[in-house]
Image (cartoon, helix red, strand yellow):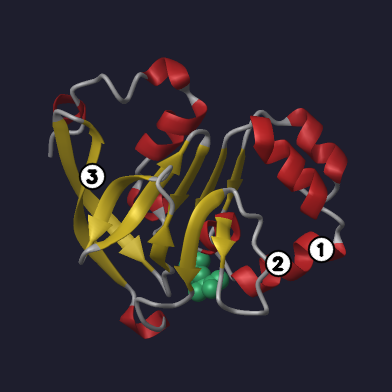
């Protein structure tokens, strides 16, 4: 999307990975900040990696001005540099009776350092949340598209998929 009008033709938004300082600059130079904030009030928004940084309320880096959808504080590049990127097996719990493990690729990934009471943690790696949700806002430290993971998209954008009530181990058995 490039202009605010583009938001009128979509039902939800994914803010992808990339570079949050650039995303932040582009959002302001294209006058998208307020239209995005308004859109997110009543539409699903998911942020992955740099997108997660943009979803946060607080980013201790003055070059990034986040949108504030998720009540979290995020540290950029906290899992290491590009060369330290890795794919890890991480366990997720989408509902109370199902735990499912799948590949999770972290690339100069952001770390969630603080979060409010309204934030639900779906997955953790080395003691830090890497997948969080609050209402219709979802944030991931990693890149689900690189490992063909679409569960998060289903949760947020396809309510009929009933991810929360399905037996995911049957569907995603490895
Ligand atoms: N480190 C990047 C940033 O701060 C995010 C990296 C990514 O999206 N893979 O924006």
Left or right for 102, reference 137: left
Q: Using the image as rendered, state which of residue 169 and residue 93 is in the foreground.
A: 93
Earlier-in-chain disc, 3 versus 1: 1
Between the residue at mark 2 and the residue at mark 1, the CA separation in whole angstroms equals 7 Å
- Disc 3 residue crowd, few under 14, some 14–19, many 20+, Cα 10 Å: some
Between the residue at mark 3 and the residue at mark 1, the CA separation in whole angstroms equals 35 Å
Against 39, is 141 above or below? Answer: below
Q: Residue 92, labelled with which disc?
A: 3
* Residue 48 visible to an observer of this rendering: no
Mark 2–mark 1 contact, CB under 8 Å? yes
Mark 3–mark 1 contact, CB under 8 Å? no
**Pointer 1: what residue?**
28
**Pointer 2: what residue?**
24
Q: Using the image as rendered, state which of residue 92 and residue 107 is in the foreground.
A: 92
Q: Residue at 72% of width from left, 37% of height from top?
A: 39
- x and y percentages locating residue 96 in the rendered image: 19, 30
- Disc 2 residue crowd, few under 14, some 14–19, many 20+, Cα 10 Å: many
Tell whether circle 2 marks a residue whose Cβ is less than 8 angstroms from ligand 1: no
Against 59, is 11 above or below? Answer: above
Between the residue at mark 2 and the residue at mark 3, the CA separation in whole angstroms equals 30 Å
Q: Residue at 33% of width from left, 51% of height from top?
A: 147
- Disc 1 residue crowd, few under 14, some 14–19, many 20+, Cα 10 Å: few
Q: Residue at 16% of width from left, 31% of height from top?
A: 98
Q: Using the image as rendered, state which of residue 143 and residue 119 is in the foreground.
A: 119
- x and y percentages locating residue 79 in the rendered image: 34, 76
Left or right for 97, reference 110: left
- x and y percentages locating residue 15 in the rendered image: 59, 51
Against 9, is 3 above or below? Answer: below
């Amino acid at each position: 999307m490039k202009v605010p009008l583009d938001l009128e033709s979509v039902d939800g938004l994914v803010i992808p990975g990339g570079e949050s300082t650039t995303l932040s600059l582009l959002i302001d130079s294209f006058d998208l900040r307020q239209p995005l904030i308004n859109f997110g009030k009543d539409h699903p928004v998911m942020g992955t990696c740099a997108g997660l940084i943009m979803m946060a309320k607080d980013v201790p880096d003055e070059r990034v001005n986040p949108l504030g959808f998720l009540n979290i504080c995020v540290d950029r590049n906290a899992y290491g540099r590009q060369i330290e990127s890795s794919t890890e097996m991480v366990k997720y719990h989408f509902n109370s009776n199902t735990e499912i493990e799948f590949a999770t690729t972290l690339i100069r990934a952001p770390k969630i350092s603080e979060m409010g009471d309204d934030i639900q943690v779906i997955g953790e790696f080395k003691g830090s949340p890497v997948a969080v949700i609050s209402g219709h806002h979802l944030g991931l430290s990693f890149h689900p598209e690189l490992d063909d993971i679409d569960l998060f998209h289903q949760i947020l954008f396809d309510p009929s998929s009933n991810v929360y009530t399905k037996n995911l181990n049957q569907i995603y058995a490895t």
